[in-house]
Every structure is written in C-alpha cells, then in structure tokens.
Amino acid sequence: MLKLNGNYLKMPGSYLFAEVARRAAAFSGAHPGADVIKLGIGDVTLPLPRACVDALKRAADEMGSKDTFMGYGPYEGYDFLREAIVEHDYAPYGAKIGADELFISDGAKGDCGNIGDIFSQDCVVAVCDPVYPVYVDANAMSGRAGDFADGRWDNIVYMPCTSDNGFFPALPERVPDLIYLCFPNNPTGMAATREQLRPWVDYANEHGSVILYDAAYRAYMTDPSLPRSIYEIPGAENCAIEFGSFSKTAGFTGTRCGWTVIPRALRRGGESLYDMWMRHQSTKYNGTSYVIQRAAEAVYSPEGQAQVAEMIGYYMENARVIRQGLSAAGLETYGGSDSPYIWFRAPEGQDSWSFFDRLLSEAQVVTTPGSGFGPSGEGFIRVTAFGDAARTREAVERIKSIL
Ligand SMILES: *Cc1c(COP(=O)(O)O)cnc(C)c1O
C-alpha cells in the first residue's frame, strides 16, 4: 500500500489568506455593489520598473538569435547578477560577502523552506511569533515541527514578539539548531538594530546554531543606521545564511528572482554549508532563467535604481498615511517606517478576527488578522502599504470614521 508523507497530513487545514478571501467574498456576495478596499495580502501593485522591462526584452531577443542564445546557466546564477548584488547590496554596507558566496534563486520563499534539506530532520527550529508562515510550514513538512494542537506545533520554539519586548525576540532557553529571523519583519513591520542583532550572532556562534536571516524587505529601510544585512554584524559569516529577494524591492513577485548567501566560512560538523547547498541546487534546480537574471541586473542600473527608489517611495508614502491616520485615530500602531507593513492593536481588547470582521462590514476594508501569524499575533491586525495611494487614503478615512 502506498504511503503518503504523513507530515503533510498533520498540517492544519485552513490557510490564513484563503480564510481572509472567503470572508471578503462572502461579504461582497451579501452586499453587491459594496466598494471593498483590500489592504490585506502582501503583494505589490505597481508595474515593473521600465529598466527591467527593457532588459527583459533585450534578453528575449538574445535568446532568439543563434550567436547570443543561452542554454543551461550556472547553478549558482550568472556572474553579472551575483557581482551586481554584491557591489550594491553588500559592499557599500561593509558586509564582506563575495559574489562566490551567492546563489541566485527564483525567489526567497522557496529557498527559506528548501534550505532545511541540508539539515537533519532532528534539528530544533525557532521562529519569531508572529511569523511568516512559510518557515513553520516548510519545517512541519520535513517532520521537524512535531504535532499541531491549539494553534501551535509542539516541537517548534516560538519566540514571542510583543509590544513588551519591542517586537524583537529574547534569546530562547531551549537552544535551537536553526533560528529564523526576518527584519524588517513581516508581519509586525519592525526593523532590527545592530545592537539587537549582535547578541543573536554571538549566541549562534557560541551554540553552533545557524541563523536563517530573511532580508526580503531590506529596501524599505529608511533609517540609515539600521543594518541592511546580517553580515554587517561581526561573526555572522560563521553562523548565518541570508535570503534576499527582488519581489518587494522591484516588483518581481510575478517575475521571480532572489538570492541566498552562504558564506564560505560557514561550516558545521566540519562540512561547508556552501558546498552542501551547491549539491542541493545542482541536483534539484537548474537555475533562474537568463532573461529574468538580466531583468534583475537592471535593478542596479542608474535608471533602475531611480525607478526602484520612486516605487518604494510611493509605497512608503502609503505606509506613512496609514501609520499617521491610525495613530491619530487613537490606535496603538507599530511598523510602517522601515517596512511596508503596519501592525496595530485592535481597540478595546477585541480579538483579531472580530476586529477584522468589523473593519470588513463597517468600513469595507480587508485586512489580515494578526492571530493568523501565530499565537502572539492575537489582538493585532496587519495592513499593507502596497495598494493604490488614493484607495489607501480612502481606507484610512473609513477606518477612522468607524472608531
Ligand atoms: C514576500 C516575502 C518574501 C519574498 O518571497 P519571494 O519568493 O522572493 O517572492 C520572503 N520573505 C518574506 C517574509 C516575505 O514576506
């Protein structure tokens, strides 16, 4: 009798965004003509920067000509893109990462989950709570999470991030092997300082843990004193893997390109984690499309940089409007100054889904209930700055008017 992967069968059924979509659709069905504004799902809405579209077209033409056609590319990605990433995203910040320590991917989500393949099923995993669900679910599928009951997995180390600790986790008592950190954070919208990250790097080096650092929102940091990369912290090259993405930086959510950094110095059990991941990629991945890597390279051209800055400026103006509007309405509001997410506490001690329903029925605004991101998200709501500017202003006015 064929047996399925039992780990998948332990996964809780209802996926957060599916339930949000179900409730929004039910509301629209019951109120035809209602003008619903969606500030829920974290997808971008502005088109690709012109420089990227032009590069895509040029690369497509190269593929159509015998003397410039490209077949299989290097498993770790083309030099031109790895070098551009290092030159713009690492070297200027003093992070001593070489182009030969990068793997180009089709986005950060896959690598954040698949990186677990090079570690034992016995590894103990720690995540921030609330958390981007991918880290937990991918490890649950690999059998590392234990069993699911009452909204949590019994073998995951949940590190509460609450208003009491400034939404930054304390070092856990049970020492994890793998530690997922994501800053600026989804969903809380909070960024991390050097002083906050340093003890984590020291802790990981002391205990032999590996930090899996998700920097997908690095481009949204406005405070110049904040670290853009974990490798700005001394010693991180011995304990950290970092994930980057063009999805939020340059609108590549549908275009698909990101990268993973594994420093050559990072070894565990005498083995190079770079070599192990190369073995993984050369077996299970045949590289990111050439045309897409050319489009990503164009992000770093002078025109691309200007266009990306304008795009991020547009979203961050939305973030400012949301943050200021909700704060002025008396809501306890976090994030939104170094990230495109605003995290706020539902008023009068309401739970996340109750206030979600109230925002939907009274203001016709779709948000994301914080409880969907983990037990410590209960009582909070996440809104995103990725929408249209006029619609975002309208949504904020409606929320203010119902409070
Ligand atoms: C959006 C997002 C990503 C990006 O994933 P891609 O696969 O690169 O699109 C990664 N991490 C977090 C926390 C995100 O919210």
Image (cartoon, grey):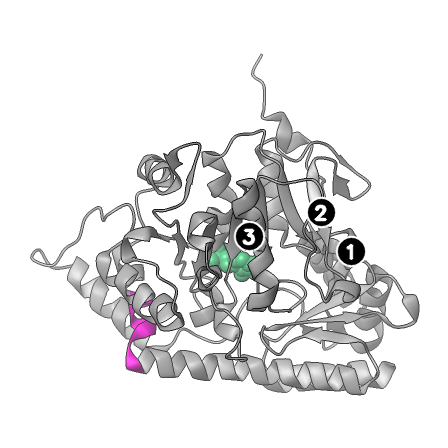
Q: Which residue is mark 1?
A: 376
Q: Residue at x 57, y 81 (%)?
A: 316
C-alpha span from label 3 to label 2: 20 Å
| Spot occupied by residue 81 in the image (x, y as percentages of width and height) | 28, 62
Q: Earlier in the sequence, mark 3 or mark 1?
A: 3
Q: Nearer the viewer, mark 3 or mark 2?
A: 3
What quarter of the picture does the C terminus occupy? bottom right
Q: Residues within 10 Å of mark 1 (few under 14, many from 20)?
A: some
**What amino acid is labelled 3 in the image?**
Asp
Horizontal side of residue 8 vs 229, given as left or right: right
Residue ID at (79%, 65%): 164
What SS does tag 2 mark?
strand
Badge 1 amino acid: Ser
Nearest to N terminus: mark 1 or mark 2: 2
* Residue 215 shows in this picture: yes
Residue under label 2 = 158
View extreme (right): residue: 348
Q: Main secondary structure of the magenta part?
A: helix
Task: Choose between 249 and 195: the one closer to the eye.
Answer: 195
Q: Which residues are magenta?
A: 295-302
- Alpha-carbon distance for marks 1 and 2? 9 Å
Figure check: 186 above or below 299: above
The secondary element bearing badge 3 is classed as helix
Q: Residue at x 57, y 33 (%)?
A: 142
Confirm whether residue 32 shows in the render. no
Q: Mark 3 vs mark 2: which is more N-terminal?
A: 2
Q: Determine which residue is flagged by label 3.
A: 202
